[in-house]
Image (spheres, rainbow, N blue to C red):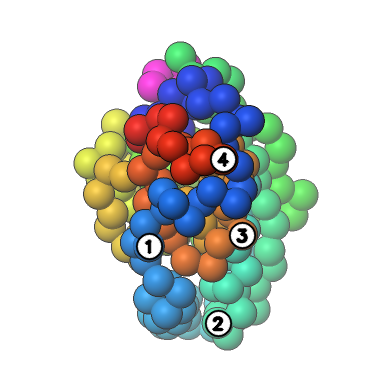
Amino acid sequence: PRSTLDRSSAASDVYKRQDYVYNLNLTISESQIRKCVERLARLIQADYKGEPLLVVGALNGSFVFLADLIRHLHLPIQVDFIKVSSYDAALKSSGDVRLHHGVRTPVAQKNILVVEDIVDTGFTADFIRKYFENEGAASVRICTLLDKPSRRLTSVTAEYVGFEVPDQFLVGYGLDYNQQYRELRAIYSLEGVVDSGGRVTEEI
Ligand code: PRP
């Protein structure tokens, strides 16, 4: 739901892996991310004061951030994942988010930290927060690496925010374009799609 891009117009066969160097601009570096993750971990640790915490990653985009964050958290944590989805592009703007699969860990009376890669419209984070509240969690907080408040269509706010970002299409460090580029160590803005000859075939 974070994208303003009409993904259906971008034929996947014009988007070759080796072309990314032509149209990805470094936006947040590895070292900026590392410092940010350490800062967020310190804040979370200070707030939970040694209390047990169930850390829940929102699949798929959060898995890289979550993996780094939990290794800086000196708290007794459990880790699980949740996947929600919006059924089609037309429904995304209406916020029709549904649970695809939930956590297997019992959540009643637990302190839950939802980890997101990005909060955009906020529909996903809003849905997940309400879901865990309805399941009887003791508390629910949201930690997002990226926050794009200019796109917000809900009143949801994250308790822990890494970077506030403008309305650009970002990839890397878990964020994807057509399921690609999640493995990049830094975050890049994607400005266009180029063909194998380096010609821009789509402006984003
Ligand atoms: C992205 C991102 C967030 C959500 C944010 O997920 O990972 O979960 O969108 O958008 P929102 O605030 O508008 O709801 P996406 O559905 O693209 O799936 P992914 O995590 O698998 O990339």
On the rendered image, what quadrant is the N terminus found in?
top left
Q: Are marks 2 and 4 in contact (CB under 8 Å)?
A: no
Work out how far the residue at label 4 is from the one at label 1, CA to CA, in angstroms: 21 Å
Q: Is residue 72 above or below residue 20?
A: below
Instruction: Please report whichever mark, 1 or 3, sits nearer to the chain's N-terminal start.
Output: 1
Tag shown at residue 72: 2
Instruction: Please report whichever mark, 2 or 1, sits nearer to the chain's N-terminal start.
Output: 1
Q: Secondary structure at mark 3?
A: loop
Q: Secondary structure at mark 4?
A: loop
Relative to 86, 150 lies left or right: left
Instruction: Please report whichever mark, 4 or 3, sits nearer to the chain's N-terminal start.
Output: 3
Work out how far the residue at label 1 is from the one at label 3, CA to CA, in angstroms: 14 Å
- Look at mark 1 in the image and give the residue it sits on: 26
Work out how far the residue at label 2 is from the one at label 4, CA to CA, in angstroms: 41 Å
Residue found farthest to the right? 104
Instruction: Please report whichever mark, 2 or 4, sits nearer to the chain's N-terminal start.
Output: 2
On the rendered image, what quadrant is the C terminus found in?
top left
Work out how far the residue at label 2 is from the one at label 1, CA to CA, in angstroms: 25 Å
Q: Residue at x 77, y 49 (%)?
A: 104
Instruction: Please report whichever mark, 3 or 2, sits nearer to the chain's N-terminal start.
Output: 2
**Mark 4 belongs to which amino acid?**
Ser
Q: Secondary structure at mark 1?
A: strand
Picture coordinates of residue 110, whole percent (x, y): 60, 60
Tag shown at residue 183: 3
**Mark 3 belongs to which amino acid?**
Glu
**Magenta residue span:** 91-95
**Mark 2 belongs to which amino acid?**
His
Relative to 77, 152 lies left or right: left
Majority secondary structure of the magenta segment? loop
Tag shown at residue 196: 4
Marks 4, 3: nearer the viewer: 4
